[in-house]
């Protein structure tokens, strides 16, 4: 164990912060939980670099838990996981990339991104 008797508080805080992130990363790599979240945030350091405006929709998107038919079906809350578009199971990926009912919204967003009117990410750098 390191001795911090004569070190400034800022140095101690920095070292402890780095060690904490390293431990968090080790735990993150070895856990079997959070697979959807890991797709969005493969490393703890990447996650800590962005300021996130937490909303219900954002939390659903990165966890896969929420008002998504495949999730509700899993707990027998719904009788079918099929999306209302009728083509396949409603998952996060289906809603973001494939759902025919959301095609127009994706096209509009793509044009706004291209024009520089909106950012490409729901995150803003700190």
Image (tube, rainbow, N blue to C red):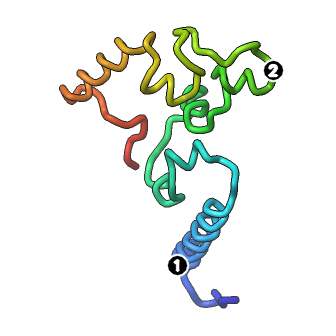
- Foreground label between 1 and 2: 2
Say which element carries label 2: loop
Position in image of residue 66 (x %, y %): 67, 26
The quarter holding residue 88 reads top right
Outermost residue on the front side: it is 87
Given residues 93 and 117, the one toward you in this image is 93
Q: Position of residue 93 (x, y in %)?
A: 50, 30
Q: How many marks?
A: 2
Would you place residue 81 above or below residue 3 in this image?
A: above
- Label 1 vs 2, first from the N-terminus: 1
Whether residue 11 sits left or right of residue 107 in the image: it is right
- Residue ID at (44%, 22%): 98
Cα distance between the residues tagged 1 and 2: 52 Å
Q: Which residue is mark 2?
A: 76
Q: Quadrant of residue 105?
A: top left
Quarter occupied by the N terminus = bottom right
Q: Residues within 10 Å of mark 1 (few under 14, many from 20)?
A: few
Q: Residues within 10 Å of mark 2 (few under 14, many from 20)?
A: few
Question: Residue sitting at 58 percent across and 42 percent down?
Answer: 36
Front residue of 10 and 105: 105
Q: Is residue 32 above or below residue 22?
A: above
Check residue 11 in the rendering and tell me which mark sits there, or answer none.
1
Which residue is situated farthest in the left direction here?
115
**In terms of depth relative to the viewer, which is nearer, 42 or 70?**
70
Furthest toward the right, the residue is: 76
Give x and y (percent) for residue 40: 49, 45
């Amino acid at each position: 164990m390191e001795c911090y008797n004569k070190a400034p508080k800022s140095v101690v805080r920095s070292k402890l912060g780095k060690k904490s992130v390293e431990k968090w990363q080790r735990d993150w790599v070895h856990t079997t939980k959070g697979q959807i979240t890991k797709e969005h945030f493969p490393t703890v350091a990447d996650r800590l670099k962005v300021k996130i405006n937490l909303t219900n929709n954002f939390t659903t998107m990165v966890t896969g838990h929420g008002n998504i038919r495949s999730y509700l079906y899993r707990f027998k809350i719904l009788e079918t996981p099929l999306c209302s578009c009728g083509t396949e199971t409603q998952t996060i990926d289906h809603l973001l990339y494939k759902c025919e009912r959301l095609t127009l919204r994706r096209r509009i967003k793509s044009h706004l991104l291209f024009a520089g009117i909106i950012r490409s990410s729901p995150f803003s750098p700190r």
